[in-house]
Image (cartoon, grey):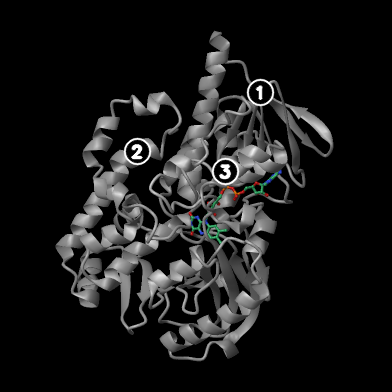
Amino acid sequence: MEPKKIIIIGSGIAGMAAAIRLAVNGHRVTVFEKNDTYGGKIASFEKEGYFFDSGPSVFTEPENIEALFQLAGENYTDYLRYEKLPVTCKYFFENNKSFIAYSDPERFYPELQQLSGEDLLRVKQYLANAEKLYNHAGAIFLNKSLHKRSTWFNKDILSVLKVTRLSYILKTLSSYNQQKLKSPEVQQIFNRYATYNGSSPFKAPGMLSLIPHLEFNRGVFYPLGGMQKIADAVFALAQKTGVHFEFNAPAQRIIHSEGKARGIVAHHQNHFADAVVSNADIYVTYKHLLGNEVKSQKVLKAERSSSALIFYWGILKPFPQLDVHNILFSKDYYSEFKHLFRFKNISNDPTVYINVTSKKDPAHAPAGKENWFVMINAPSNTGQNWEQIIGNTKKNILQKISGILGEDIEPLIESETIYDPLTIEKNTGSFMGSLYGSSSNSKIAAFLRHPNFSRYAKGLYCCGGTVHPGGGIPLCLKSAKITTELIEADFRKRKNH
Ligand SMILES: Cc1cc2nc3c(=O)[nH]c(=O)nc-3n(C[C@H](O)[C@H](O)[C@H](O)COP(=O)(O)OP(=O)(O)OC[C@H]3O[C@@H](n4cnc5c(N)ncnc54)[C@H](O)[C@@H]3O)c2cc1C
């Protein structure tokens, strides 16, 4: 096929992955990025001798990254090295219990039984169901467009129907977990996976029970050097495949006429293309780039996902009680999510996530010290008094962490940077600071996500965490694949007409 000219708005992980796929297919691809660098939410900074990944910290399903390198005929190990973590996460409960989620099943199951007395057969069955669901339903719904007839009239749809139980759709994740698991601690662990796409386990469907498959059956990985290395590797591959990047170049508008996208305006100049891909937040795409108020309001019909409040702390001494990923659970999970999604604030006892990459990369902190990424789920920004929320939350979590670790933490903080939903919105262009676009807080949430193409402007495609199949690095990479397949199919169709 004759090479086409393609413009991508945004160099998030999905934007770069789409660019690579299209460049490998022989097209001329230019990425316009509003910031001065690539990666979007995958970003990092250094302060007072400490290194911090400022966005994602949990790396699962690395095959999605490997596939990009394979496609481009490159060896991914020349760009990125990663290891499977022996402990996926360490959990601390308010009743003084703790649990080390080993990745080795030989250690995981005995440890789980010691924590809770949970019937291990139930957990094994739970994870086997999660795997089945992921391999059958996930294979279709996470890898194909939900908005094309060919997806629904595919022979594989039968295997989806075979593994899909009504409880995945009719029950919430929390009531599904209550039915399948006995121990309240184990239920809380499995409820947590709703937060992986910014949702509440008390509203999101049981379908999300497929997420633990990735962590418990497949593992959590650590990219040596930190998450920033993922963005670095994908950017280097994009350059290698001939993708051209324009930084400090916000798309000001998508040029469209007669129902067709024709290019973009950047630096007050027209740039025409055969196809435009928006990796920007889908709300922003409609509201600001297309100027379509009605469509942008339609996007908001699906509730926005949660955001985050993050404290990046340089800590003066090491804490052997902590691992790379640590969760300090709240006592009352239901109340925590009611505060997040109903009252749009943060409860006085929020679950605290602490990520310490200096445990794997000692260079991330000065000798004998640790870099703590301390994250609390926060509501998306609706104009709350963030200064007050930050003050309250900091006081509450210092008390919680100090109590659990048995040491006063505040005097040990020698460096502090704070991100709230406003910072996240400013840095990444994510509307209301949501981490994952829309939440999955309804039974039909998956179907409310925007498709990977626009019906409003032909030739406009959408990839990234705010559209199908969803947020998080693995799904963003799948989104790039679906989007580029749709583009190629449309090019072929146009050629044949
Ligand atoms: C604090 C935090 C923690 C997270 N934790 C995890 C985790 O542990 N694991 C995980 O897998 N995921 C996690 N995520 C989610 C994950 O980071 C995102 O889903 C993913 O990185 C989003 O990628 P994307 O391709 O959608 O683009 P984004 O990263 O959202 O990037 C979009 C890009 O578009 C650019 N842009 C916007 N508007 C314009 C315009 N008009 N012109 C030009 N450029 C524009 C932006 O500057 C940005 O570079 C986390 C996110 C955050 C913020």
Name the residue that disc number 3 marks: 299
What residue did someone put label 2 on?
A: 139
Q: Could you tell me if residue 100 is visible in this image? A: yes
Q: Is residue 189 above or below residue 220?
A: below
Q: Give the residue drawn at x 42%, y 82%.
A: 320
Instruction: Residue at the far right: name it.
Output: 268
Amino acid, disc 2: Ala
Tell me the number on the disc at residue 259: 1
Corner quadrant of residue 460: top right
Name the residue type under label 1. Answer: Gly
Calculate the distance from the C-alpha at mark 2 to the C-alpha at mark 3.
Answer: 26 Å
* Element carrying mark 3: helix
**Mark 2 or mark 1, which is nearer the start of the sequence?**
2
Q: Give the percent coordinates (x, y) of residue 215.
A: 35, 57
Q: Position of residue 407 (x, y in %)?
A: 47, 91
Q: CA distance from mark 3 to mark 1?
A: 19 Å
Task: Mark yes or no: residue 245 visible.
Answer: no
Q: Is residue 414 above or below residue 194?
A: below
On screen, residue 146 above or below 343: above
Q: The disc labelled 3 sits on which kind of residue? A: Val
Q: Residues within 10 Å of mark 1 (few under 14, many from 20)?
A: few
